[in-house]
Image: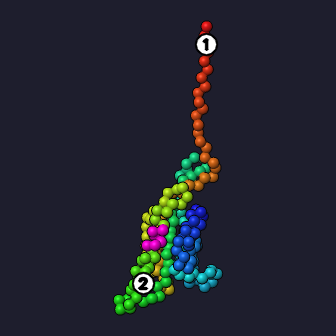
Amino acid sequence: MECLLEELVDLIGNAMPDLEVVDEDYGQLEMLDQESRDIYPLTFPAVLIDAPSAEWSNIGGLNQKGTATIRVRLIIDCYDDTHHHSTTTHLIARRKEKRHELHKLLQGHRIGEDSALIRTNSRFYTANHGIKVYESTYTATVTEMLEPQTVMTQAKPKIVAQVLQ
């Protein structure tokens, strides 16, 4: 699953250079209020990526194919006042554009030779400190090969001709 995280961090970081942080999600957002935790500062906008689960089936020997779940969180600070008379309601549309840019990058993206990322769920919520979180869940088929695949071949029949007298 780590290969998924590595590829997606690189893909998003290269395609969206205006993001401050693109990283594996190990709870950085939830640790903001924990002063005793030693973490690097989480700056915004940020994208945090996690691959929390996969359902596997055997495809032969020790090799397996699975459906992985990938969670991507776009995190934007919303310190701007966006009420009706603020003249900054356009910032809501700017957040929507950033969310669409990220989704367009991910939806259908192929990881290796396996299937493409397909969004299966999304939710938006507000975290502490005026932070908006745009969370999307994707699934993709992944293959994990622990031994070389063998190809079964049938031996050609050997024909022996005997002349009878």
Q: Main secondary structure of the magenta part?
A: helix
Q: Amino acid at mark 2?
A: Leu
Residue plotted at (53% across, 63% down):
53
Outermost residue, top side = 165
Q: Is residue 109 found left or right of 150 in the rendered image? A: left
Let me know if residue 103 is in the magenta part. yes
In the rendered view, tell whether residue 113 sits above or below residue 120: above
Q: In 3D space, how far apart are the residues under numbered discs 1 and 2 (Cα atoms)?
A: 92 Å
The mark closer to the camera, 1 or 2, is 1
Image location (x, y in percent) of residue 40: 62, 81
Q: Which residue is mark 2?
A: 91
Residue drawn at x 63%, y 83% is 36
Which quadrant would the N terminus be assigned to in this image?
bottom right
Across and down, in percent, residue 147 comes to 64, 49
Which stretch did the figure color magenta? Answer: 100-105
164 is higher (above) or lower (below) than 23 = above
- Residue wearing tag 1: 163
Are the residues flagged by discs 1 and 2 in contact, CB closer than 8 Å? no
